[in-house]
Image (tube, coloured by chain):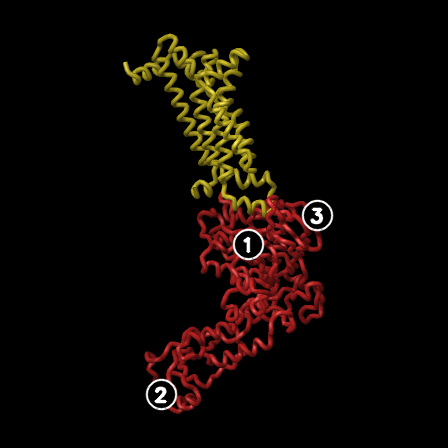
Chain colours: A yellow, B red
Amino acid sequence: MNVLHFITSFFTDGAHWSGYDGIPTRLLEHLQYSLEALGLAALIGLPVGLVTGHYGKGGNTLTLIATAARALPTFGLLVLIVIIAGFGMLPVMIPLVVLAVPPILVTTYEAVRSVDRSPVDAARGIGMSETRILLQAELPVALPLILGGLRSAAIQIVSTATIAAYVGLGGLGRYIVDGLYQHDYEKVVGGATLVAAMALTTLGIFWALGRVAVSPGVRRAG
Amino acid sequence: MRISGLTGQAQRAGIEARHTPAARLKHNRSRLSPQQSELGWSRAGGNGQTRRVFGVLIRIDSVTKRYPDGTVAVDRLSLEIPDRAITVLVGPSGCGKTTTLRMINRMVEPSEGTIWIDGQDSRRQPVNTLRRSMGYVIQNAGLFQHRTIVDNIATVPRLLGWSKDRARSRARELMERVGLDASLARRYPYQLSGGQQQRVGVARALAADPPVLLMDEPFSAVDPVVRKGLQDELLRIQDELGKTIVFVTHDIDEAVKLGTMVAVLRTGGRLAQYAPPADLLSNPADAFVEDFLGADRGIRRLSFFSAAGLDLLTAPIVAVDATAEQIARAAQGAPYLLVTGIDGKPLGWSEPGALTAGSVDTGRLLSYGRPFVAGEDSLRSALDCAVLSPAGWAVAVDGEGRATGVISQTAIAEAIRGAHEAAPGVGGTTGAGEPKALR
């Protein structure tokens, strides 16, 4: 009985491919949690990182908040919020967002800060507004690093979204939690494999995004 | 001869072509001198029309920049920057030249004083409108690396709301004007050399045809050969477009070469001298300016005198197939003879006695150094030729390289004395305007 055997038997079992506990359903649930968490984290991290990076102020405060947020144990947070707010999506979303905001925020801030100052000076000198400078001169050059921050956040979210299962929700964590409870190691390994595959897919998606969204002038110059 | 400006601006101003140094010298007689600056209007050309030729476009009026920590970068500076000319701000680091430039487009706001642009307080209009009316060129070009060359140049027209097609076709036009090959249009900045990038920087600044061009040490980061090419190109473009250019540099040679007017600033942001380069070289205001100009300002000043008036001798020139009689006649009173080929091009110097009539042995001739072009080059070039020539005589050639005469160091020295007497320097007493440096 080795891991490979677990994997083959898990994926060849037809029962795992349909119904409310089937792989497609659990994948979609996992994807949904991950996308929602990433979207929320980006909604907070990107604007704050872009603006603070552009004005070059608040870097220390940001780093402090990010370090503090990273120190929060995700599982502990989950339990705490369940106690305070009861079961539901909230106890899952908050730890995931708290997990994902720091890498997005800090990398975005650093990415904008590290953009060569002379094109920015030129942009200001030829009469671009501050918003335009940020969006048209800084963002396109900072984009590879910003995408890198989003990518690490996304991978952490995908790997951690398994916690949803602890509070009675679905997702790929269901296989791991249930499998452990039922001593069904085939299920545990199968669930873990799916999570790993999803993380790798995320990597691939971000690589492709980089190819499409980043200008060749930035990509090849770096 | 007229050059058509991009928007007809040049025609309106009656800017004449100044491609040849001689034409430039002639043109410069009508260039602004400080005394004329108040007039703004003068009678130009021979066609009887009165047009606005030169005035003051930018007036810096006792401007001070003091930083919160108490540092004074610019101290009660007043400057009148003439229209359609290159004004150079030069000085050691910490003299406030860049701060001054950046106050013109309000990248830095003055603490005291006012900057007037075409008679209007620069604070009266929205800052980005002001900046879009001034081209801005910086060291290292500052190109947007995510945009292609053509889109970099099209930036300001796009900001001004031009359509993409119109902005791009304008950008391609500009590429040609600054000497960039059309094949570079779709490239990205990282694919270009430093010199090419700087040309793109100039093209981007010119794209919306602003009346003013602000240039902050634009050529400092490129090697000397490329820098010279860029300087010549700037002078050529300026001849065609007649912009009001404010140019910051720490290089006094660059200032003297490019400037119609040169403002020398001293540490602490105070004006040491504001004068045309020839006046600066002949009459530095004080020890600081003199020191900043360097040791050989006397020699450099000769760049402003044309070699056209030199009394060239043709007698000591013999052809390679000269007869004994011709050699003997030429040798009267000349220690050396210049031997030319059948085509009239110089071959080298020889003592008359060493020449064999009928066919001179060209292998035994002394080198004639580098000749100067009569009517184009300056007294500096002529003197340089004489000093470099083993015979101590300079060789003058025409545009095709044929020898037109020779002249001794002594005769050049006399011409230099004569030129200095005719143009004693500062104060504009000659009324001859400010000649531009020749070669």
Residue at the image position 43 percent from the left and 25 percent from the top: A155
Q: Relative to residue B282, is residue A42 depicted above or below?
A: above
Looking at the rendered structure, the secondary structure element under dot 2 is helix
**Residue at far top of view:** A182
Disc nearer the start of the sequence (3/1): 3
3 vs 1, front mark: 3
Residue at the image position 63 percent from the left and 60 percent from the top: B84
1 vs 2, front mark: 2
Disc nearer the start of the sequence (1/2): 1
Residue A218 marker: none
Q: Position of residue A221 (x, y in %)?
A: 44, 43
Can residue B6 be seen in the rendering of this structure?
yes
Q: Amino acid at mark 1?
A: Leu
Q: Are marks 3 and 1 on the same chain?
A: yes
Looking at the rendered structure, the secondary structure element under dot 3 is loop
Q: Which residue is mark 1?
A: B174
Foreground: A25 or A97?
A97
